[in-house]
Image (cartoon, rainbow, N blue to C red):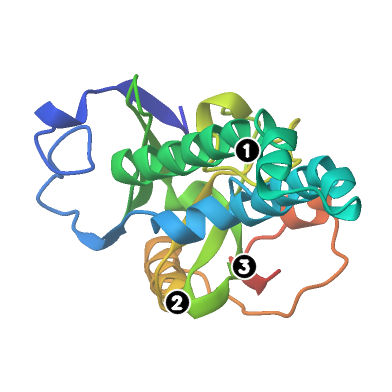
């Protein structure tokens, strides 16, 4: 199998973020977790959700505001939507926080390991030789996503990867290191170990209109901004 997964409770990990101790000829190049704020805004759309609830509150309160009603009348007009907004926002932030705390991405000189799961923890091992390309999405303050396109016909369920997966790639899910710090530096490290592992030269090219099929047929690792 090119892609392996194993259920594992992180409290009992023999090595942090990994389902087993690394062999003597393998070492960690980089290891990290998503940033809570960057993950909440990019993967869970926290800011958009806040704008949505703010618009609902404004619409609900507008008749009272327009008529010049008192403060209590305005409060009564939003007595249902305001608590729902608070509950919704807190829930989303909590989910993002739990996801960030339980997610660990590891790049070794042989593979990329993704430890995922809030309730049921699973680890996905992605051998570097099975990585066809890596797309880099830069977020504010140096955070960003690195999406891995895999060779071959192996599939990982989109639901099993979420939110560590590229949006809208359902039929061919692409594992994604989400909201990681210093994303460009991490991408460079990934390119270096991929080159050393495969013996091929990795190329850095600008974003293009290249199709998914074209990307899968590439031999050199392409690290592209998106």
Rendered residue at 65%/51% (across/down) = 50
- As rendered, which of 180 and 174 lies closer to the eye? 180
Residue 217 visible in the shown view:
no
Instruction: Decide: is 93 above or below 107.
Output: above
Q: Measured from the top left, where is residue 224 in percent x and y?
A: 66, 72
Q: Nearer the viewer, mark 2 or mark 1?
A: 1
Q: Report the residue at 10% width, 27% height from top.
A: 12
Q: CA distance from mark 2 to mark 1?
A: 45 Å
Q: Position of residue 27 (x, y in %)?
A: 18, 58
Q: Quadrant of the N terminus?
A: top left
Q: Residue 82's mark?
A: 1
In space, the residues marked 3 and 1 are separated at their CA atoms by 34 Å
Question: Residue 91's x, y, as percent?
Answer: 49, 34
Whether residue 225 is visible to the viewer of this picture, yes or no, is yes
| Residue depth check, mark 3 versus mark 1: number of the one nearer the observer | 1
Residue 147 vs residue 23, the one in the foreground:
147
Indicate which disc residue 137 carries: 3
- Compared across the picture, whether 204 is left or right of 182 comes to right
Q: Which residue sits at x=65%, y=47%?
A: 166
Going from N to C along the chain, the mark reached first, 2 or 1, is 1
Q: Nearer the viewer, residue 6 or 23?
A: 6
In the displayed structure image, the side of residue 172 where residue 114 appears, left or right: left
Residue where numbered disc 2 is placed: 188
Which quadrant, please, contains the C terminus? Answer: bottom right
């Amino acid at each position: 199998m090119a892609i392996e997964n194993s259920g594992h409770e992180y409290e009992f990990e023999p090595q942090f973020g990994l389902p087993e101790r690394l062999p003597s000829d393998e070492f960690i190049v980089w290891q990290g977790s998503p940033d809570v704020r960057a993950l909440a805004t990019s993967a869970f759309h926290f800011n958009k959700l806040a704008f949505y609830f703010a618009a609902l509150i404004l619409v609900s309160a507008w008749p009272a505001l327009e008529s010049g009603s008192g403060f209590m009348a305005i409060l009564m007009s939003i007595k249902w939507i305001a608590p729902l907004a608070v509950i919704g926002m807190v829930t989303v932030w909590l989910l993002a926080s739990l996801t960030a705390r339980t997610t660990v991405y590891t790049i070794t000189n042989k593979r990329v390991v993704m430890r995922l799961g809030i309730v049921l923890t699973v680890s996905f091992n992605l051998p570097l030789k099975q990585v066809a390309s890596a797309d880099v999405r830069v977020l504010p303050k140096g955070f960003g996503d690195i999406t891995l396109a895999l060779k071959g016909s192996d599939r990982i369920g989109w639901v099993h990867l979420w939110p560590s997966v590229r949006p809208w790639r359902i039929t061919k899910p692409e594992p994604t290191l989400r909201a990681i710090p210093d994303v460009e530096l991490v991408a460079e490290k990934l390119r270096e170990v991929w080159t050393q592992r495969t013996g091929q030269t990795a190329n850095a090219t600008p974003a293009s209109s290249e199709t998914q099929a074209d990307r899968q047929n590439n031999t050199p690792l392409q690290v592209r901004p998106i």
